[in-house]
Amino acid sequence: MRKFELTAPNALTKRATIIDDPAQVDAHLQELHSDLNAVLFKDAIMGGLGWRNDTTRASAPTAAGVQQWLKTVEDLRTLLAALQWHIHEQKNCPFISSPDRSISIVVMTGNGETGKNGFEDPTNQAEKGAVAEGFVERNGQLELFNRDSFKIAKEKQKETQVWALLYHYDKVLNEVRFELSLPTGFDNKKITEWGIRLILGSIPNNPATFTIKDEPNAPATVDVEPKTGTF
């Protein structure tokens, strides 16, 4: 686990707390919510990778990336909706929120630093607008009150903490790396700081052995009236 460090080019930028030990990752996921585990996120990423592999030479140039993101979003929200999580959107940005609205998850593509315990933290690959800026700013404010404790004090929390399932398809290594991380800084349409990064691993893309899990058949529910929290 690495605590806040200073790094170039901006010496004022705090490094995230990085957790990459699988047992510690699972323990922290359970602290976030009892429904969360590494296998669930791997299943969603596998579904997206399957759709990426379904594209052909005749597909549009951006089809592989777009289809991968669309299916990852769909599978993650379907899996969690079966556990009574709430599917909703904000200005066409897809979210999935816990039943008590304490946390929400959004799927984003990340740059090459995604899923690595390296010298730099990642950032989102595609530029984001006001919705992302809003929840990142709220995350930063919540982190100030919860910096000494990873576990959220739910009885005092009035805002929803938004986490990002960040993934990156590495064409050179032919793999997908992914992590669940808490964005806390935003500038010029990019996430600039993370409070905590839970490294979930990588999936090699080997078409000879790659299999797609069956579609979850539980119905997804849509709840547009939040009971507590931002969402």
Image: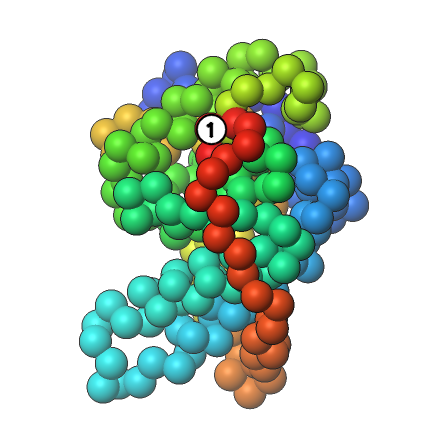
32 over 111 or under it: above or below: above
Quadrant of the snapshot with the N terminus: top right
Which colour assignment does the render follow? rainbow
x and y, in percent, of residue 140 in the image: 46, 20
- Callout 1: helix, strand or loop? loop
136 over 27 or under it: above or below: above
| In-front residue for pair 226/185 | 226
The amino acid on which the numbered mark 1 sits, given as a three-letter code, is Thr
Left or right: residue 128 compared with residue 27? left
The picture quadrant where one finds residue 19 is: top right
| In-front residue for pair 114/41 | 41
Residue under the point 55% across and 87% down: 208
Left or right: residue 55 compared with residue 214? left
| In-front residue for pair 98/40 | 98
Residue under the point 32% across and 29% down: 133
Question: Is residue 18 something one can see in this rendering?
Answer: no
Q: Please name the residue that numbered disc 1 is placed on.
A: 230
